């Protein structure tokens, strides 16, 4: 089977991870500009000051994408580049950069798929409480509207937020991302609620502008499965799905929170403060979402946790294993499963099962895989980058996407993470994901990898040979 004609083959990046130019052309300081410079916070102190210099080399990068036959490029806009102080005055040069990038994509017929928030927030707002401060909601909506108005004549695919669970949990529970707060459940859940409201309000604004494009949100997609049929483990998996999945998908797609989680949060006294108006906004806009973006890397295998005092905590870098913050369940590394060098499970099968779970709970909402890929240390022999495991990983997952489509799941595109090697938030440049290699010892020169040619062929043949 070939992939349907309207299915988009893409690849992705995010502003902080590729752009660099952190203080050029009027850009404001972001929370990541500050956080990444705190000693010990990132791998070998790496930061995005230069990253892979996409800001200056976007023309070369987009040309390489075009030569690969890429149909769509998912990238993010840096909020502090557009609004240096978070709210208020717009930086014209910031708009210019994205206008140029969008036009460059369109020159080659590459569809721009734009994320508004991939974690870099204006530092000014972070200092005022970031996502725990309700004023951030209005600031975000203004920023979103500015982007819709500036780019919406050419951009027809919008993602509001990338992975709310990651930046909120890492920001307020594990202190692995800014604002580096530890174990504050009240703030964690408050931040998620404020993000959902900011999303819903932005969707409402977008629909009122009648630009006739589509808008949605990207979530981590980590469907949870019990390690066996034991009742208490099945119950633990359901608990985990409620906290890790439904808490994120329900307010977007149903416009309300899963009661199971709300009740527990009430008991623990950590239910977010929410007004009736905010709840109404969520409800009103549930049907306005055109799609959900899924960032799929791995599922979660779960068992009941019996050792409340266990200090084997969930890894902030995503490796399987460890007890989750409320102590109720633990993620389990299983002997019969495969894992990447960073301990992430490799399971295309779980993707298929997971999308069926989504369909059952949320109906036929359109889905895109907005990220999927293999973080690896690529093999280089005589200057050739032989990233065969990456091609194999993507092949298996594209086959899973095919299978899900043939079983009735409404999937309309696949974006490999990542188009080019880039800065991993916590793993520096050591963990590579790209089709295009960046030589850090040779002035950031670009080079096509094995997977580049492989993906080019997949796109040309529309996946028929997979
Ligand atoms: C996703 C993010 O969580 O995973 C990306 O959206 C990130 O920005 C990717 O790079 C891979 O994570 P890591 O930690 O392996 O770089």
Image: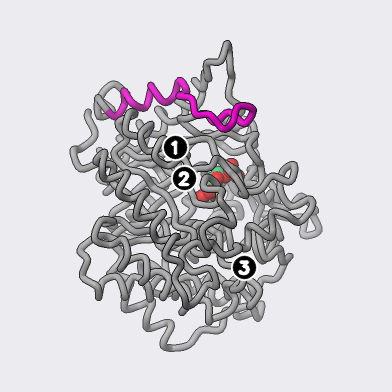
Q: According to the image, label 3 marks what residue?
A: 123
The circle on residue 13 is 2
What residue sits 73% from the left and 54% below the top?
37
Q: In which quadrant of the rendered image does the C terminus lie?
A: top left
> Which residue does the image show at 52% across and 76% down from the upper left?
136
- Answer yes or no: is residue 186 visible: no
Residue 309 is situated, as x and y percent measured from the top left of the image, at 81, 58
Q: Quadrant of residue 249?
A: bottom left
360 with respect to 267 (left or right): left
What residue range appears in magenta? 437-459
Q: Nearer the viewer, residue 227 or 141?
A: 141
Marks 2 & 1, CB-CB < 8 Å contact: yes
Q: Residue 364: x percent and y percent?
A: 26, 56
- The question of residue 310 being in magenta is answered with no
Q: CA distance from mark 2 to mark 3?
A: 21 Å
Instruction: Between label 2 and label 3, give the one nearer the viewer.
Output: 3
Image coloring type: one colour
Residue 198 location in percent, x, y? Answer: 44, 73
Front-most of residues 65 and 175: 65
Measured in 3D between alpha carbons, the distance from the residue under mark 2 to the one under mark 1, in whole angstroms, is 6 Å
Q: Which residue is mark 1?
A: 419
Res. 196 visible in picture: yes
Mark 3, other Cα within 10 Å: few <14 / some 14–19 / many ≥20: many
Note whether 42 is above or below 71 in the view shown. below
- Distance CA(mark 1)–CA(mark 3): 28 Å
Task: Identify the residue at horizontal 66%, vertical 77% (top origin).
Answer: 268
* Residue 334 relative to residue 117: left or right: right
Label 2 sits on a secondary structure element that is loop
């Amino acid at each position: 089977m070939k992939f349907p004609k309207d299915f988009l083959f893409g690849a992705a990046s995010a502003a902080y991870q590729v752009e660099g130019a952190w203080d050029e052309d009027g850009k404001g300081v972001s929370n990541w500009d500050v956080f990444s410079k705190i000693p010990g916070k990132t791998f070998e102190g790496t930061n995005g000051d230069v990253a892979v210099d996409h800001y200056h080399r976007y023309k070369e990068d987009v040309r390489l994408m075009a030569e690969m036959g890429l149909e769509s490029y998912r990238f993010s806009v840096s909020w502090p580049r557009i609004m240096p102080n978070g709210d208020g005055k717009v930086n014209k040069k910031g708009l210019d950069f994205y206008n140029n990038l969008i036009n460059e994509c369109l020159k080659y017929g590459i569809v721009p798929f734009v994320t508004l928030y991939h974690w870099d927030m204006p530092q000014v707002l972070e200092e005022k409480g970031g996502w725990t401060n309700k004023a951030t909601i209005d600031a975000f909506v203004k920023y979103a509207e500015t982007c819709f108005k500036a780019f919406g004549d050419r951009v027809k695919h919008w993602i509001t937020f990338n992975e709310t669970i990651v930046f909120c949990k890492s920001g307020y529970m594990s202190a692995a991302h800014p604002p580096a707060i530890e174990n504050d459940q009240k703030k964690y859940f408050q931040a998620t609620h404020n993000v959902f409201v900011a999303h819903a309000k932005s969707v409402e604004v977008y629909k009122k502008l009648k630009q006739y494009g589509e808008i949605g949100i990207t979530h981590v997609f980590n469907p949870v499965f019990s390690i066996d049929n034991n009742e208490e483990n099945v119950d633990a998996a359901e608990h985990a799905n409620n906290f890790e999945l439904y808490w994120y998908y329900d307010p977007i797609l149903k416009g309300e929170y899963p009661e199971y989680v709300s009740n527990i949060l009430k008991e623990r006294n950590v239910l977010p403060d929410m007004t009736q108006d905010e709840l109404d906004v969520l409800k009103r806009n549930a049907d306005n979402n055109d799609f959900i973006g899924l960032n799929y890397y791995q599922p979660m295998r779960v068992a009941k946790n019996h050792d409340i005092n266990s200090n084997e905590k969930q890894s902030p870098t995503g490796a399987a294993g460890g007890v989750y913050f409320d102590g109720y369940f633990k993620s389990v590394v299983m002997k019969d499963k495969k894992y990447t060098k960073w301990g992430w499970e490799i399971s295309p099968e779980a993707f298929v099962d997971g999308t069926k779970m989504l369909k059952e709970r949320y109906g036929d909402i359109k889905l895109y895989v907005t990220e999927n890929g293999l973080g690896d240390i690529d093999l280089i022999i005589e200057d050739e980058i032989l990233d065969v495991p990456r091609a194999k990983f993507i092949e298996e997952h594209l086959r899973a996407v095919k299978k899900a489509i043939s079983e009735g799941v409404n999937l309309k595109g696949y974006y490999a993470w990542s188009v080019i090697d880039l800065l991993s938030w916590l793993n520096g440049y050591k963990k590579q994901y790209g089709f295009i290699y960046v030589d850090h010892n040779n002035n950031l020169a670009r080079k096509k990898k094995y997977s580049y040619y492989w993906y080019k062929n997949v796109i040309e043949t529309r996946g028929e040979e997979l």
